[in-house]
Image: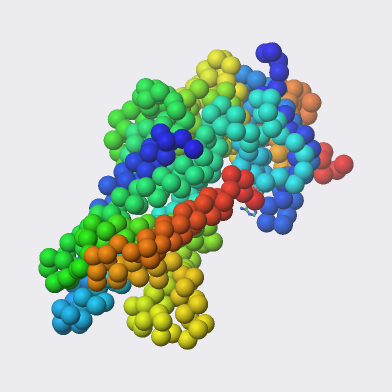
Amino acid sequence: MTSSAAVEVKGLRVHRGGRLVLRDVSCTIPQGSVTGLLGPSGCGKTTLMRAVVGVQIVSGGSVSVLGAPAGSPGLRNRIGYATQNPSVYGDLTVAENLRYFCAVLRAPRSDVARVVDEVGLGGHEGQLVSSLSGGELSRTSLAVALLGTPELLVLDEPTVGLDPLLRDELWTLFRTLASRGVTLLVSSHVMDEAARCERLLLMRDGALLADDTPSALLAQTGTGDLEQAFLSLVRESEAA
Amino acid sequence: MNTTILLATAARILNQFRHDRRTVALMVLMPSLLLILLRFVFNSEAAFSRAAPALLAVFPFAIMFIVTSITTLRERTTATLERLMTMPIAKLDLLFGYALAFGVVALVQVLVAVGVSLWWLGLSIGGSVWLLVVIAGLDALLGTALGLFASAFARTEFQAVQFMPLFVMPQVLLCGLFAPRESMTPVLEWLSNVMPLSYAVDALTAVTTSSDITGELLRNLVIVAACGLLALVLGAVTLRRRTP
Ligand SMILES: Nc1ncnc2c1ncn2[C@@H]1O[C@H](COP(=O)(O)OP(=O)(O)O)[C@@H](O)[C@H]1O
Ligand SMILES: [Mg+2]
């Protein structure tokens, strides 16, 4: 079952605010991999992720997650989701936030110390979330997604605003998790993170331009870096 | 429904209050301060005793409505609700968790207000003090439940505050505080009859004037509790896991 898909999206169409923001998106995300979802701001990354975790009203198509339709009750403690805007309580401490979500997920209390360590927030446990820096805040939100034993992690721009060292540590963590069989879908609007992923979904204006490995994309477009590959794919799709 | 998650949610909300002492102080002391003010506005113990039962219903009701609708709206508009909706928490766990946490605050608020009225402001009551506390507490919970429900229709905290004139003021005007309900024109009396606060005021008036626990008193209590429960269930219905 190692090659089976963790997420299968078929012909997904989503309207938001009266506009079609996802136009027939189809893709598969293999199990135990880090898949990057890349594209400019406003292209529909967050919308696609919301559809995968089952909180987005969709107009058509299907999304299947870990073998069940997205949003099924049985999936609710098998998925970890970190929203783009940090989703933690500002008027609680880091540890109080983690303990609450631990209780909701029925995860062991010992998970709190584990995830604090994984996102490098040691020493901040007793700090009020509203007093954290932007990077610490987004790592607290990421830590909540790591509680329990999620089989799929959906992380919406988790590395925005982090210094390069921390960013590197988080990508190492993502790869470690993937090597244990966890599937990760990580979005970013900066292309230099693309090279860190095993697979890439390139998006523009509500449509997928590519669903492939970084090296295959470079070979296909005959370019030297992924930024150039993306531009070449955009030109190709506009010419068609 | 899952009791552990419900209790964890209530504890989380009380914990949030613990970090916001000013809001707690406002919630606990505000009805009492307003009652003290009114005692001096009336400048007579007899006149105050006549109005006090209605005020013990109105002030906690209005304050709990405001505080609950804003707190819940904050949860709805920040991403925490979106995250919770991907987790194994039932919508009723969340709403009853809110009701429980605010119920604790409401009970403290009402105990302080009743204590101040009885032992300092000279309110004399014919019936049981504990029944008075129970009714005022239920009524504050009704404010909480309506606040939870109303927050579904607001997009911003500013809008939530504006629901106060819509949900709370008509009930205050028609509950019998300003004029006896029987003396109102039929339309207004009918309106007053469909507003839950009227029954809370009737029940409080009954407890302060006599020690009898009549069938009417119990019926009024059941109406107040049922309206609160209905508002909570409607609140759960307006909460959606999937949003546009
Ligand atoms: N709540 C909303 N209501 C209406 N339109 C929205 C809403 N959220 C996002 N959109 C629109 O949907 C499109 C895709 O947005 P989003 O998925 O957030 O993009 P990204 O995450 O790639 O920046 C954008 O054009 C955005 O304006
Ligand atoms: Mg986004």
Is B63 on the left or on the right of A119, as rendered?
left
Q: Nearer the viewer, residue A74 or A43?
A: A74
Q: Farthest right residue?
A: A240
Is A232 on the left or on the right of A38, as rendered?
right
Q: How is the image coloured?
A: rainbow
Q: Farthest left residue?
A: B120
Residue A16 is situated, as x and y percent measured from the top left of the image, at 68, 52
Please give the name of the residue rendered at 67% of the width and 46% of the height, measured from the top-left corner: A57
Residue A99 is situated, as x and y percent measured from the top left of the image, at 37, 32
Above or below: residue A240 compared with residue B146: above
Please give the name of the residue rendered at 53% of the width and 25% of the height, measured from the top-left corner: A150
Q: Quadrant of the C terminus of chain A?
A: top right
Q: Nearer the viewer, residue A20 or B190?
A: B190
Is A211 on the left or on the right of B171, as rendered?
right
Count of marks overlaid on the render: 0
Which quadrant would residue B130 be assigned to in this image?
bottom left
Q: Quadrant of the N terminus of chain A?
A: top right
Which quadrant would residue A134 be assigned to in this image?
top left
Q: Nearer the viewer, residue B64 or B119?
A: B119
The answer to whether residue A43 is seen in the rendering is: no
Above or below: residue A149 compared with residue B87: above
Please give the name of the residue rendered at 32% of the width and 33% of the height, measured from the top-left corner: A125
Residue A27 is situated, as x and y percent measured from the top left of the image, at 74, 31
Please give the name of the residue rendered at 32% of the width and 46% of the height, measured from the top-left corner: B14
Above or below: residue B144 compared with residue B15: below
The answer to whether residue A78 is seen in the rendering is: yes
Residue A188 is situated, as x and y percent measured from the top left of the image, at 59, 37
Q: Nearer the viewer, residue B128 or B23?
A: B128
